[in-house]
Image (spheres, grey):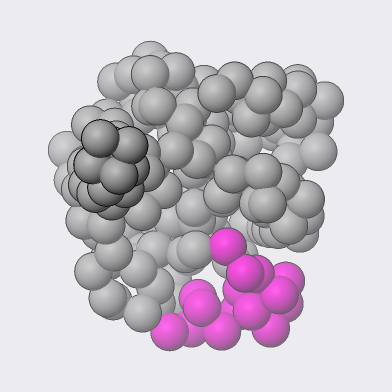
Amino acid sequence: MRRCLSSFLLLTSFAMPAAACPALFDRTLNDIRDQPRSLCEYAGKVVLVVNTASQCGYTPQYEGLEALHRKYRDRGFVVLGFPSNDFGGQEPGSNREIAAFCVNQYAIDFPMFAKSSVRGDGANPLFADLAKATGSAPRWNFHKYLVARDGRETLAFATKVEPQDPNLVAAIERLLAAR
C-alpha cells in the first residue's frame, strides 16, 4: 500500500504544472531576435513590463531596470522590455540595432521583445490588456506595469517613476512576498 501511494504521488507530481498561466500572459510574442516566445514562461513570477526607447531622455532608466532585474530575479522577478517608436520616433532602429544598443550601452540581460506599438488601435495586445486592466495607457516611453505572480493584480507606474523609486520597489517587494 505504501509503495502504491508513493508511486502515485511521484507520477502525479510530474503531471502538475509549476504555475498556471494567467490569461494576461497566455499568448506568444516575438522576442527581439524575432523568435516566438510564450509569455506563459513567466507564469508564477512578478513581472515588470516596460515600453522602451533608445533615443529618449528616459533611456538611462535601462540601467535601473537591469539593476532591479539582477537584484530580484532569484526571488522570482523579471523585467520584460518592449521597444516602441510610438513617442517622438525615439526608437527608429531595427530589432537587431535595438538589441545591440541594449547590450553594448547598458549590458541588458532581461528579456527584450520585438519592437511594437503600445498604444492605439494597433497596440501590442499585451499593452492593450495592461492598459485596460489598470486604466492607464502609456503616454510616453518607459511606462511600467507591475504584474503579480498570478496575474490578478496589475499596477501602473508613469514614465517619470524611476526604477529605484521607493514606491515601485515597495510594490515589487510586496508582490514577491505574496505567494
Q: Quadrant of residue 93?
A: bottom left
| Segment tinted magenta in the rendering | 96-110
Residue located 73% across and 57% down the image: 70
Residue 83's x, y, as percent?
45, 60
Residue 30's x, y, as percent?
27, 66
Q: Is residue 143 shown left or right of residue 176?
A: left
**Residue 105 in magenta?**
yes
Q: Is residue 66 shown left or right of residue 90?
A: right
Q: Is residue 99 above or below residue 150?
A: below
**Residue 45 in magenta?**
no
Name the quarter where the N terminus is drawn: top left
Q: Is residue 106 above or below residue 87?
A: below
Q: Is residue 87 shown left or right of residue 142?
A: left
Magenta span main SS: helix
Residue 93 visible, this angle: yes
> In the image shown, does 161 or 46 lie closer to the viewer?
46
Q: Is residue 33 shown left or right of residue 36?
A: right
Residue located 64% across and 30% down the image: 176
> In the image shown, does 65 or 94 lie closer to the viewer?
65
Residue extending furthest toward the left? 121
Residue 106's x, y, as percent?
72, 71
Residue 104's x, y, as percent?
69, 83
Name the quarter where the C terminus is drawn: top right
Residue located 32% across and 37% down the image: 2
Residue located 58% across and 62% down the image: 110
